[in-house]
Amino acid sequence: MRSILSSIAVSLALYAPAQNIDLKNWPEAANPITVGRLVAQRFVESPHNSFKPPAPPKSITYPEVCTWYGALKFAEVSQDKALLDKLTQRFMPFFDTEKHLVPRPWHVDFAVFGTVPLELFRQTKNKTFREMGMRFADAQWSIPIDSPQTVKDSYQKFLDKGLTWQTRYWIDDMYMITMLQSKAYQMTGERKYIDRAAHEMLVYLDTIQKENGLFYHAPDAPFFWGRGNGWMAAGMSELLSALPKDNLNRPAILASYKKMMASLKKYQREDGLWGQLIDRPESWVETSGSAMFTYALITGVRNGWLDANEYTPIARKAWLALVGYINKEGDIANVCEGTNRKNDYQYYLDRKQRTGDMHGQAPILWCIYALLKK
């Protein structure tokens, strides 16, 4: 349920004078620092997250990883040393009492775990974090030695094309793969990591992006599902932020990013957000995908990839709408539950709407980092 105070503040802000249409001046309820402290603290106090609650987690799942990363970036940009210490201490048991919760890097959804120790290394300079994170990054391009030979042969076909053996042409891959490889490049300076991430992204874009700039959930699920498209929007934003200007694939990736942003502009609803199915106005408002789109839009404006006059009002309207769904505990509502692909329109409309699901908590923190970054 929406915070009443947030809703009132957002409603007033929507009618603010035109000169306030920027990404810097906010009513207190939408102030990125205020919201960031609330959502980050909520994460610090939360137990490890299960992808399918209420079952306990067998290993750390990607929604928690992505929220953890967002909290770390907020700690950095807000210069909150106490928060960084708490996030670091939350990780330390993975070297000891919670070692069993560290996922094996044999799938894209598990491999993205490596992003957190790499970011911890960047902020703390503790080389133990670097070693763990790089094992995950390197594993994306190294076939597991215990794989059956027939499986190894199928994986090798991807490696021969310069792609990770984890390639499967699902849109969320383009966050899970490129995020980790981009971070590995930033931590090592080795071009192989960022260059192969860019090559992977370009192949995915050439394979699955549609004429309108959006993406089906899968070839056998021809629906423009919100959060699925959100992963791609966020993945392109992260990759472009790290990708050197001289990478030969950069112009094509940037063009695909702009094509997607133009489509999102078209489908933004009157309230500022996007639907569970982007192009279906009868579908319900979904906040995790909307937050990912907002992050991508803010990042594009801030980096000069998007025309500021055209896209700043879109990003601002979206952020003001999003904070209206955050309650006093720091949980965001209207988050689609974990969703597999299915060739069934009603299946997507009937997905449960959760409050506090980390699929939604994560991109709220990404938005805040993008808004505060100098």
Image (cartoon, grey):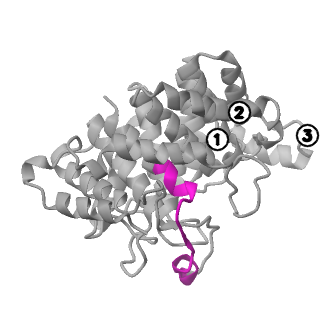
- 7 left or right of 96 in image: left
Residue 120 seen in the current view: yes
Q: Earlier in the sequence, mark 2 or mark 3?
A: 2
- 12 left or right of 223 in image: left
Q: Earlier in the sequence, mark 3 or mark 1?
A: 1
Residue holding disc 3: 146
Residue holding disc 2: 136
At x 46%, y 49%, the residue is: 363
CB under 8 Å between callouts 2 and 3? no
At x 36%, y 52%, the residue is: 294
Q: Position of residue 287 (x, y in %)?
A: 43, 62
Residue holding disc 1: 112
Q: CA distance from mark 3 to mark 1?
A: 21 Å
CB under 8 Å between callouts 1 and 2? yes
Nearest the eye: 62 or 243: 62
Mark 2 Cα shell of 10 Å, populated few (<14), some (14-19), many (≥20) = many
Q: Position of residue 70 (x, y in %)?
A: 50, 40
Task: Say which of marks 2 and 3 sits in front.
Answer: 2
Q: Which mark is residue 198?
A: none
Nearest the eye: 240 or 209: 240
Chain part drawn in magenta? 345-363
Circle 3 SS class: loop
Q: Position of residue 292 (x, y in %)?
A: 43, 53
Amino acid found under the numbered disc labelled 2: Phe
Image quadrant in which the N terminus is located:
bottom left
